[in-house]
Image (cartoon, rainbow, N blue to C red):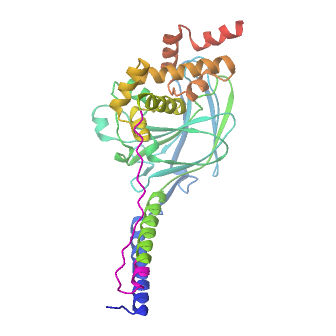
Amino acid sequence: MFIRKDLIKSRYFIFLLSFTLLLAIIASFVISFDKEYLFPSNNLKNLHIDTYHEEIEHYSTSKIYVDEQTLKLNYQLTSAKDEPFVALFLENKIKEKFLLNTQTFNAVSIHLKCKEGKRIPVTLKFDYPSYHKQKYPEIPFTKVIDYDGEKDYNISLDEFEIRSWWLRYYGLNKTNEPITNHQNLKYFIVGSCEALKPNINDEINVSSIYFYHDNSTTLFSLLMVALLIYMGTFLWYLKQKKTNKKEQIIIPIHAVQIETGDNEKKIDKIKNYIGQYFSNPDLSVSDLQNDLGISSREIGQLIKSELNSSFSIYINMVRISEVKRLLKESDSPVSEIAYKCGYNQIPHFNRVFKKETGLSPKEFRDKRDAY
């Protein structure tokens, strides 16, 4: 039985038109263009904007300047505390009200301009009733921005995490509490640079803060589906143009080569991977398993048998080795070196370094300078 070519062609284009229309309808429901500005805002008069600092006698100094277009934080960190800080915060003037409800958003954008700072923490504090019952304050989620020039920094809300110091302060265990469980934003906080030395004047300018819905993943998925459907229907169209003569379709198959490798090759992969990504403070065995295709159990066994170590001990050894090299060969601040080598908590880094070398980082560097 033969199908007329004009009928095949009309069916093909009717299907494509119908599918495109259906895709457009689906997109109109799943794609959100919601955006809400915290600053600048027509409700600026309803915002309370201020700063806070350490609760010590010789605390860090700060000044804020607010107009309709800019929030400016000028500060100088004190040398009277190991981890000094200053922060600018926004809240609703009416304490019982929230800044906004983040339910329809999955990202935040902040436009920053810094004078000296390079690691700027941004914190979202949410009201959390179940925590209140346990007499805890608002629950904070933080993302540290690696500043590399004035621009908009767009951050997915999934990148914000509860910091370990807050959990330790309230005697809580590590939690995987997702930020999406929280909607009522109480405070928006921009902190002082975490890598800045004391007694250095810095200035942070914020010219916009807004929450929005990032549709990039959804759009990519819809485009991929559309591409597959269009390709499939085009192949069907080409096939239907032929006669009803049955032809054998030969599909070339290329065998997938699975590299098994011996222990030596696998341990080399593990060492190379750790050597490349040790600066990631969240590097875990799961990352190696996902990227190398070696089970976490086998990774542990290989490190033990081939390196006579464990994953945590070995990665710590790599990090400390690189820290020692940078302390010898550069004049970068100790805190900056620590962050570059995968330590995001300076007190923890100081303890680990002294345990491994018998010296504090400063003493180690001073020993270098003595020669």
The magenta stretch is 236-261
* Residue drawn at x 40%, y 92% as measured from the top left: 7
Position of the C terminus, as image quadrant, is top right
Inspect the magenta stretch and tell me whether residue 305 lies in it: no
Which is nearer the eye, 314 or 101?
Answer: 314
Can residue 232 be seen?
yes
Estimate the x, y position of residue 39 in percent, counting from the top left: 56, 51
* Residue drawn at x 50%, y 12% as measured from the top left: 356
Position of the N terminus, as image quadrant, is bottom left
* Residue drawn at x 36%, y 46% as measured from the top left: 182
Q: Is residue 125 depicted above or below 340 in this figure?
A: below
Q: Main secondary structure of the magenta part?
A: loop
Estimate the x, y position of residue 342 in percent, counting from the top left: 52, 28
Q: Is residue 217 depicted above or below 28 in this figure?
A: above
Please indicate whether residue 260 sits to the left or right of residue 322 in the image: left
Which is nearer the eye, 42 or 237?
Answer: 237
Residue 166 sits in quarter: top left
- Number of numbered tags placed on the structure image: 0
Estimate the x, y position of residue 16 in percent, counting from the top left: 43, 80
Residue 330 sits in quarter: top right
Which is nearer the eye, 362 or 150?
Answer: 362
Q: Is residue 175 depicted above or below 179 in this figure?
A: above
Which is nearer the eye, 20 or 267?
Answer: 267
Please indicate whether residue 284 sits to the left or right of residue 44 in the image: left
Estimate the x, y position of residue 263 in percent, counting from the top left: 41, 28
Can residue 310 be seen?
no
